Every structure is written in C-alpha cells, then in structure tokens.
Image (cartoon, rainbow, N blue to C red):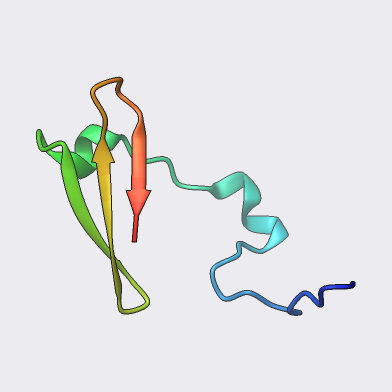
Amino acid sequence: MMVEKPDTFKHAPLPREAAEIRTIESADIFRGANEIMIRHDGVVYRMKITRQGKLILNK
C-alpha cells in the first residue's frame, strides 16, 4: 500500500532555513516549572519534565 505525501506541509522548514533553526533553552520555556501547556493549531498539549530530566509531550 502506498501512502501519498502532501506536496507542502505548513510547519516544515524550507531547505535553505535548515541552518537557521532556532534553539531555545528549556529553562527559558519552563521558567522553574516542571510542566507547561502549549497551544498548537487550536489544540492544547502538555509538556512535562520527568524526574529523570526527560521531556514528555502529551495531547
């Protein structure tokens, strides 16, 4: 079974932008908290730092 891929994806970077990917420190996002909410395309996601220091993203 073949799966068709869309010609464009609105969140995918263009090839020339690949070297310009922004890096943000998690400490700047979380600001001392261990859980934040992220709204993306009208859907709210929860991002959490685990006790082991890993990130988990849930819908």
Q: Residue furthest front?
A: 1
Q: Nearer the viewer, residue 3 or 17?
A: 3
Residue 42 location, x and y as percent?
31, 79
In the rendered view, would you say 15 is above or below 41?
Answer: above
Q: Residue furthest top?
A: 52
Quadrant in the rendering for residue 46: bottom left
Split into 4 quadrants, where in the image is the C terminus?
bottom left
Q: Residue furthest right?
A: 1
In the rendered view, would you say 15 is above or below 19?
Answer: below
Split into 4 quadrants, where in the image is the N terminus?
bottom right
Residue 43 location, x and y as percent?
31, 73
Q: Residue furthest left?
A: 32
Residue drawn at x 61%, y 62% as measured from the top left: 13
Quadrant in the rendering for residue 33: top left
Residue 21 left/right relative to 48:
right
Residue 53 location, x and y as percent?
30, 23
Residue drawn at x 42%, y 40% as measured from the top left: 23
Residue drawn at x 23%, y 23% as measured from the top left: 51
Quadrant in the rendering for residue 37: bottom left
Residue 31 left/right relative to 11:
left
Q: Give the tally of numbered discs.
A: 0
In the rendered view, would you say 38 is above or below 25?
Answer: below
Residue 42 left/right relative to 19:
left
Residue drawn at x 54%, y 68% as measured from the top left: 11
Residue 30 location, x and y as percent?
18, 41
